[in-house]
Amino acid sequence: MIATKQLPVEVLQELANEFAAGLAARAAVMREAIDEIVRGPSADAAHRLRLSAHALAGTAGAFGATELVPHAERLESLGKEWQGKNGAATKASVTDAFRALDLLTTSIGAVIARLRSR
């Protein structure tokens, strides 16, 4: 969680709003990376997925959006796995990635509503 004693409430709310506003774009970057891997091995796409998911897991935790963390961590793990295989993915792991991304996307809606209502 972000240290609330150091920042005014207005600043914290603005940061939370910016985080919430960027969630859909973060999910889109991950979806594009997975889609690219579906079309063929891509170490670059695997790297993008890993880094995007890693960054989301960290910032989600900082904003108390803990429901996003397990899904982001799963996507990060798959990105790392695929990166180690030069961007190649099995059909089962791609299915797993889309499932994690769908769960993440579903959770994003609840997080946005909660963060903006503070």
Image: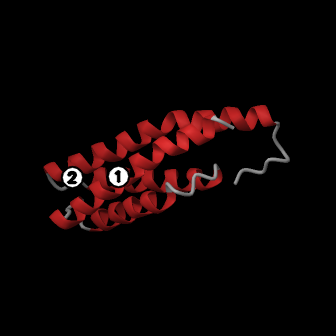
Q: Nearer the viewer, mark 2 or mark 1?
A: 1
**Is residue 61 shown left or right of residue 13?**
left
Q: Is residue 73 above or below residue 55?
A: below
Q: Earlier in the sequence, mark 2 or mark 1?
A: 2
User: What is the C-alpha distance between the residues marked 2 and 1?
Assistant: 14 Å
Residue receiving disc 1:
101
Residue 105 percent coordinates (x, y): 39, 46
**Is residue 27 shown left or right of residue 118?**
left
Residue at screen point 31% across, 68% down: 81
Q: Is residue 74 visible?
A: yes
Identify the disc placed on residue 65: none
The amino acid type found where label 1 is placed reads: Leu
Task: Please rate how many residues cluster around mark 1, counting C-alpha atoms within 10 Å: few if below 14, some from 14 to 19, many from 20.
Answer: many
Residue 70 percent coordinates (x, y): 47, 63
Q: Secondary structure at mark 2?
A: helix
Residue at screen point 33% across, 64% down: 78
Residue at screen point 48% across, 40% down: 23
The amino acid type found where label 2 is placed reads: Ile
Q: Secondary structure at mark 1?
A: helix
Residue 55 percent coordinates (x, y): 51, 52
Q: Is residue 113 above or below residue 98?
A: above
Residue at screen point 24% across, 67% down: 85
Residue receiving disc 2:
37
